[in-house]
Image (cartoon, grey):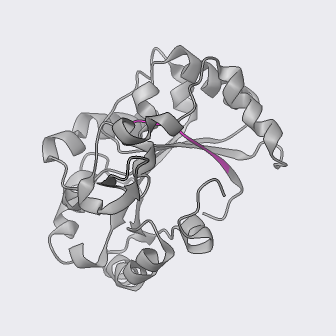
Amino acid sequence: MGTPSLFFRFGGCNMRCEGFACSERAADGTEVLGCDTVYAVNKEHFAHSWIPIRKSEELLNVFALYELPEGVDVVLTGGEPLIYAENAIFIAFLEALHARGHQITFETNGSLGVDFQKYPIYKECIFALSVKLSNSLEALSKRVRGEVIYSLASEAKDAFFKFSIDADSIGLGLEAEIDEICLHAPKTKVYCMPLGGTKAQIEANTEPLIEFCKAKGYNFSDRLHIRIWDANKGV
């Protein structure tokens, strides 16, 4: 947080997380529920606004559009970027980023594994494991896959847990859920961030979550981009 970074947001996800109850209005007027980036998750309603990529150079050309520090950190997010984990264009992009000296961080839900032996570039990456809790309304068997969590945490350059939590869910068993998930990757740092897609939602969930983190000894992670720019995209 607070580090100059260039985010690449990839469309598509293997989850919907409708329990997060953030909404986005589609072109046809449909109100679509999901996480705060539902426009990058729901292919049915938003794929028309996604940009197809046919070669890795198209992604690398994005750097020319901005005045950025040399070797700026790069964050790959979504949606769920690891649905492209074995895509040749995606792998070439990662290898080019690493060769240029960029630190690469994945924001992933931690349910999709990568082949560290076949694609050693992933050993040079950092993984923010945003494993979904029951407040996402996703099935436990789908959102918590212990063997995948362990692999990502143990094989990557670095990894940490990052949980999205709203004030209403605190005290409803989240502590036990987080403890169970963390057993799959002991000694991995835990960060909690306030749930929400707008500044008002973030602020409503912040103070209760800070108290929760203080009580549990977790790290608090703000959602700085939303606090500064609210729900605006492309900031």
In the rendered image, residue 182, in percent from the top left (x then y), is placed at: 28, 54
> Which residues are the magenta region?
6-12
In the rendered image, residue 60, in percent from the top left (x then y), is placed at: 72, 29
At horizontal 40% and vertical 26% (from top left) the residue drawn is 114
Near-viewer residue (79 or 144):
79
Classify residue 149 as left or right of residue 171: right
Near-viewer residue (38 or 116):
38
> Is residue 89 visible in the rendered structure shown here?
yes
At horizontal 45% and vertical 17% (from top left) the residue drawn is 117
In the rendered image, residue 121, in percent from the top left (x then y), is placed at: 56, 24
In the rendered image, residue 136, in percent from the top left (x then y), is placed at: 24, 56
Q: In which quarter of the image is residue 70?
A: top right
Near-viewer residue (200 or 140):
200
At horizontal 57% and vertical 69% (from top left) the residue drawn is 224
Near-viewer residue (37 or 67):
37
Classify residue 177 as left or right of residue 210: left
**Total labels drawn:** 0
Residue 50 colored in magenta in the image: no
Q: Quadrant of the N terminus?
A: bottom right
Up/down of 215 relative to 222, above or below:
below
